[in-house]
Amino acid sequence: MPEKAGLTGKVAIVTGGTRGIGLATVRALAEAGATVVLTGRDEAAAKDAAESVSGAVTGLRLDVTDAKAVSTVIRGVAKEHGRLDIAVANAGIMEGALLGMIRDDDVQRVLDTNVAGTIHTVQAAARAMMRKKTGSIAVLASVVGERGSAGQTVYAASKAAVANVARSAAKELGGAGIRVNAVAPGVIDTELTAQLTEQARAGSIGNTPLGRLGEAEEVARAIRFLVSDEASFITGQVLGVDGGLVL
Ligand code: NDP
């Protein structure tokens, strides 16, 4: 039996919900009874992903680097459903390169997607939540943003920024009844980490006390907790979901 506790009647948006951690989060929120809108850059992929999940799930096209589109889509979701309770700013990309090999356009692409995209999403979600003076937002930081990582300078910088989006927005929005938290996953087995070399994956496993990569569902359950009323007095936190990698 799917778990129904907790999110019945809530409306959620998950950016980058077409696969990986985003899609697992959509599934976790829908299983708990939420109505979920997922987004991705390709409309057909977003609709296919939505259809793969049972429950009240729809898929929309949205590139989070487009601030105006983020605002329009989130406003539209809140208008259509009469409310927005949960937003998960999950969309993100990773580019690996040693310092000397980093290209300007890759810096821009990663910062535009991971940092600006997260800010656009938090901003638009907060606006939609303000009216009811309640809501919860989760953003995707990373263990790499906390610890740094050779060959991932741009990505690590972007994820450190995301953690501070959560902390700053939490301070600013607490008075409006809106909580903002981050999860900082370790190395999770998704398409994003499929680009890591076997050596890098083995190295991560070796440095992880629990001795394995994480599953997208394990991150999704932490996100579901943070955005639920179970976490009603938790805001501005960065929750590691990393098998102990950060230790
Ligand atoms: P995936 O590559 O599997 O999925 C990324 C998702 O982001 C896709 O749904 C993709 O959708 C979407 N996306 C990418 N760029 C954009 C954009 N400009 N606008 C809208 N959507 C976009 O990644 P993961 O599931 O592994 O990662 C999800 C998040 O978790 C990311 O923020 C990542 O940095 C973070 N994270 C992941 C870790 C891991 O080990 N996997 C570790 C730490 C953090 P589409 O291509 O359809 O547009």
Image (cartoon, grey):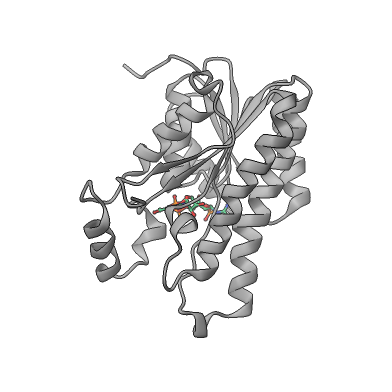
Q: What is the count of numbered marks?
A: 0
Residue placed most toward the observer, 106 or 44: 106
Residue 85: x, y in percent?
63, 25
The one nearer the camera, 209 or 141, is 209
Furthest residue in direction bottom, as rendered: 100
Image coordinates for residue 214, horizontal then vertical, percent: 31, 47
Residue found 76% across the figure and 43% down from its top: 71
Q: Quadrant of residue 11?
A: top right
Counting from the top left corner in percent of width and height, residue 92 is at: 54, 55
Q: Position of residue 153 (x, y in %)?
A: 51, 70
Q: Residue at x 31, y 46 (%)?
A: 244
Write the residue at 58% across / 73% down.
Answer: 106
Tell me: residue 168, above or below residue 41. above
Q: Residue furthest front?
A: 247
Quick check: 150 left or right of 157? left
Q: Nearer the viewer, residue 181 or 33?
A: 181
